[in-house]
Amino acid sequence: MTAFYNNKELFVLLSAIYAFSSATNNGCGEVRRRATEDPQNLTSPNFPLPYPRNTTCTWWISSVYFYSDIYIEFKHLDIEDSNDCDDDSLTIYQHYKGDEFVVKICGNEAADETLKLGRDVTIVFKTNNDIERTGFVLQYYMVDDDSRERDDYYTERYSDHWFTVVVVVFVLILVALIITIVFACYFQRRQARAQKQSNIEDIQFSGYGLDDDEYKTHI
């Protein structure tokens, strides 16, 4: 009976280690990813096994280009269903022209949908301490967007950022120039002072550098 209890404890421990390892390998936690033109997979922890309870995973996905959209396609979706997805849920956020666009998903009704989102997307997967399902598999990829509206949006969004960078660089260059001038003036004054001291010493030696006969006559 004792041996069975110990084996059971060992099984629970190994299961916990496996769940943690699977969650880590799937990037569960707070992970940043880059969307390219090649589709990339994102899965719930432990997939295809049931996802763990009391889990929160966050992925920040950004496109490699400014003028682009991120597309998300669901290949598998099996999340605990509830009213307003208050239990387990997969929530997708994006910001566009100051407005936040939110999609909250549970159950399996959105399995055939493809979402077209902006350049920056945040995906949050939350589970409670109740039912476990197999979770989700989605693919995300980037598509260029040459529309004028999107160009204007990103020009506005990043213009302030680049202006700040230019101002900071200008201030740093100005400070470096001032420091260089101050040190140059300091070393120049120091050199002039040393030269003046050398001239005084030369005058002193030339004034008292009399030969012996003249010195004796004055005595």
Image: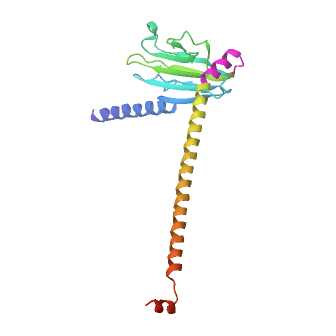
User: In the picture shown, does residue 95 fall above or below 164?
Assistant: above
- 197 on left or right of 34: left
Quarter of the figure with the C terminus: bottom left
In the foreground, 45 or 89? 89
In the foreground, 2 or 123? 123
Q: Residue furthest left?
A: 2
Instruction: Report x, y in % for residue 182.
Output: 53, 50
Instruction: Report x, y in % for residue 38.
Output: 67, 27
How many numbered marks appear? 0
User: In the picture shown, does residue 189 fall above or below 164?
Assistant: below
Q: Where is residue 116, by image quadrant?
A: top right
Q: Where is residue 11, by image quadrant?
A: top left
Q: Say which residue appears at 52% left-offset and 61% top-offset.
A: 190
Magenta range is 144-157
Instruction: Report x, y in % for residue 14.
Output: 40, 34
Q: Say which residue appears at 37% left-offset and 31% top-offset.
A: 12
Quarter of the figure with the N terminus: top left
Q: Is residue 150 magenta?
A: yes
In the foreground, 54 or 99? 99
Q: Residue furthest top?
A: 83
In the foreground, 128 or 143? 143
Q: Is residue 95 magenta?
A: no
Q: Residue furthest right?
A: 146
Q: Say which residue appears at 50% left-offset and 76% top-offset.
A: 204
How is this picture coloured? rainbow
Q: Say which residue appears at 58% left-offset and 16% top-offset.
A: 96
Magenta residues: mostly which secondary structure?
A: helix
Instruction: Report x, y in % for residue 56.
Output: 44, 23
User: In the picture shown, does residue 102 fall above or below 24?
Assistant: above
